Image: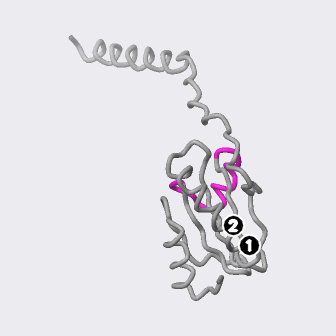
Amino acid sequence: MNKTVKILVVVVVVAAAAVVLVFKPGKTPPPQAPPAVPAPPAAVTAPVPAPASLPTLVDLGAGKCTACKMMTPVLEELRTEYQGRMRVDFIDVWENPEAGEKYGIRVIPTQIFQAPDGRELFRHEGFMSKEDILAKWTELSVEIK
């Protein structure tokens, strides 16, 4: 084969590839997020809680996440037992994905410990027991008792 024929073959192959790319059907859209799940009872689902005059534990999770479901009774107990001394908020990141983005959530559940002025003091990813939460407040020198 002479040089001209080889060049012509390469040009035809490149042109055919370009035609395929131009007329290729669009990609299928990414899968949709799971349907929104109602937050656990008595949960606060505001996208971004406002700073409070109390230390605040913000738990970011979702209604169908197993570890998140395990956190529900812990959060309820803390909310009841420490009412007026500590604020406990739950944000469902499936219902409020913008909150997950704002807080930079990578894993659910994530607990964020905030000072009374709203500053983040510490964050934890995964399940956290009531005892561990109370110990962390103590370690952070935040009095909630």
Secondary element at image label 1: loop
Question: Would you say the magenta stretch is mainly helix, strand or loop?
Answer: loop
- Provide the secondary structure element on which disc 2 rests: helix
Which residue lies at the image location 61% right of the left edge and 32% below the top edge? 32
Relative to 50, is 126 above or below? Answer: above
| CA gap, disc 2 and disc 1 | 6 Å
Q: How is the image coloured?
A: one colour
Q: Say if the magenta span includes residue 99.
A: yes
Q: Quadrant of the C terminus?
A: bottom right
**Residue 3 vs residue 117: left or right?**
left
User: Looking at the picture, how far across and down is residue 37, in whole percent?
Assistant: 67, 40
Q: Which residues are magenta?
A: 94-108
Q: Which residue is mark 1?
A: 83
| Vertical side of 96 occupied by 117: above or below | below
Q: Is residue 84 above or below residue 11?
A: below
Q: Residue at x 74, y 81 (%)?
A: 117
Q: Residue at 60% x, 68% y: name it.
A: 112
| Point 55% across, 15% down: residue | 23
**CB under 8 Å between discs 2 and 1:** yes
Q: Which mark is residue 79?
A: 2
Q: 3 or 57, which lies in front?
A: 57
